[in-house]
Amino acid sequence: MSNASPPCPPVPDCPELVDQPITYSDVQGTILRGYRVDHARHFILSITQAAGARAVIAALVDGTGGLPRITTAERWANKPDCFVNVAFTATGLTQLGVAKEQLATFDPSFLLGATNAQTAQKVGDVNASAPTNWIGGMADGAAVHAVLSLWVHKNPEVLDRVTDALTTAFAGCITVLSTHDATALPDNQVHFGYRDNIAQPTVQGAPPRKRPMPDAQCEVPTGEFLLGYKNASSGTYSQQPVELSTNGSYAAFRILEQDSKAFEDFLDTYAPAVGLTPEMLAAKVCGRWRNGNPLVLDPDGGIPCLPTEQLNDFHYRDDTHPAQDDRLGLMCPAGSHIRRTNPRDSAVQGGAPSIHRIVRRAMPYGPAYDPADPQSAATPRGLVGYFINGSIFNQFEFLQSQWVQQAGFVMSCTQPWAPKNGNAHWNISGEDVFLGVNTPATSSFTLPVAGPASGNKAVKGFSSMITTRGGAYVFFPSITGLRYLAALPAASAPPAS
Ligand code: HEM
């Protein structure tokens, strides 16, 4: 069957992007900048009195009343000791007085919200991950109105100082439903032991990363991450009023609990069955070794640690150099986490990979897993933060529902020089080992081998090792947008519920 498959369609050239400068001072910083911090605290908020909440927003925009100023994407001469950003749910915007007709122009997925049954089904928040099980007041999506996040570099005491100031400001108008802290692990690791914070989209016009990370992929048009700019489909995500459109962005806020013991057990149990070491299986399910080296540049794990500037400089297809071509996923499986969530130049269904990119701003919570400590396995740990995009529908939800949870999106095409080597379409099965809805009855992860797919190996029968514990779909207004919200007339606000 693979012999009859066509060669992959050519990789399109990078489009010439129209230069549209971004007013950094109008953009909430976390959208375009990684803060490179050690601690974060996320506040899940419910607005009980709109006028007071609007006054808090005004104070945050101006940095008055003892509150820190909302961090923008502007360059700073000295790194601030605290970064702060705030985003609202659809009900939060309604509480503040945004009119129904205006809200109707917002992203339809945002309007449905993260706890909606249809949304949950779509993104795989089912079984233990179902919103009804969510913690910290997030199970009742209608009660969650905003997520405010603080990030601090070295000094966790700053978090407590700013928390005190916020608590005073919130009195009588905003209830804190819960707070969620995150703390960086050494060497940019996340739980499960992988180095993270390597691959991010290079957004046209965004401030350059502090530590440059050359990227073999095209720049992504600004409009994929900021409303009001040209996006990758040559359109513009925009909504009404204009103050709540330009320079705003959306995010899926997620609390994802990781069962580190189950993951290590999975590696130890399944690796021997497919003739791999546990470390190699860990690399195959992610697409990177735990030290960050991508499999396509270090297929056998023979290189100690690639220089940082090489870690993101790779692609999956090479039409002229057979040794560097991995369209079949023999080095980095098509079903690995990084290849599902960003197939780069792989041939896939569902539009070009460039229209489904996502900015990740999440950090670990909970202590590192210690296999020697019997109590450690039961301690909650995971990843908490934002997955940022111009369209929740086209980006976060597309990734979760199409590429993470399905296997049929890899196109049927062969290597031009050796079509008998196999066919990428048959070299993937099941769902993402990290993010999929994996049950013993359905789970499957293919380890392709050269030649016909009938020779492939697969790991089957494992369960999900990551559980969604909380979430919210939120909108980050621009600074102009925050001022607009702060100035909404009291008369247009509905009574607080
Ligand atoms: C606890 C949950 C998660 C874990 C443990 C995890 C782990 C990782 C790791 C280790 C990497 C490689 C490091 C890097 O390339 O920077 C990575 C990359 C990535 N992850 Fe996740 N991830 C999680 C959740 C998610 C979610 C919810 C999404 C989006 C829906 C996502 C999307 C991505 C993307 C887009 C990349 C970069 C791929 C690339 O550009 O090559 N991840 N993740």
Image (cartoon, rainbow, N blue to C red):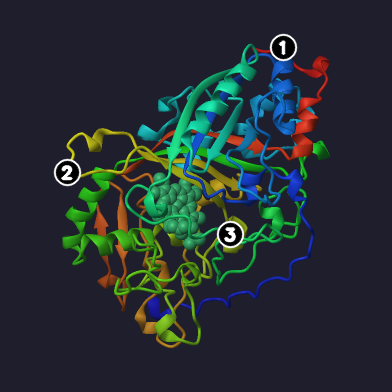
Q: Nearer the viewer, residue 280 or 114?
A: 280
Category of crowding for the residue at label 1, using alpha-carbon neighbours closer than 10 angstroms: few (below 14), some (14–19), many (at least 20): few
Q: Is residue 247 visible in the rendered structure shown here?
A: yes
Residue 210 has which mark? 3
What residue is shown with label 2? Answer: 372
What residue is shown with label 1? Answer: 495
What is the three-letter code of the residue carrying label 1? Pro
What is the three-letter code of the residue carrying label 3? Lys
* Nearest to viewer (mark 3 / mark 2): 3
Picture coordinates of residue 444, whole percent (x, y): 30, 55
Q: Nearer the viewer, residue 227 or 155?
A: 155
Category of crowding for the residue at label 2, using alpha-carbon neighbours closer than 10 angstroms: few (below 14), some (14–19), many (at least 20): few
Relative to residue 73, is residue 303 depicted above or below? below
Disc 2, SS: loop
Disc 1, SS: loop
**Which residue is located at x 36 percent, y 37 percent?**
366
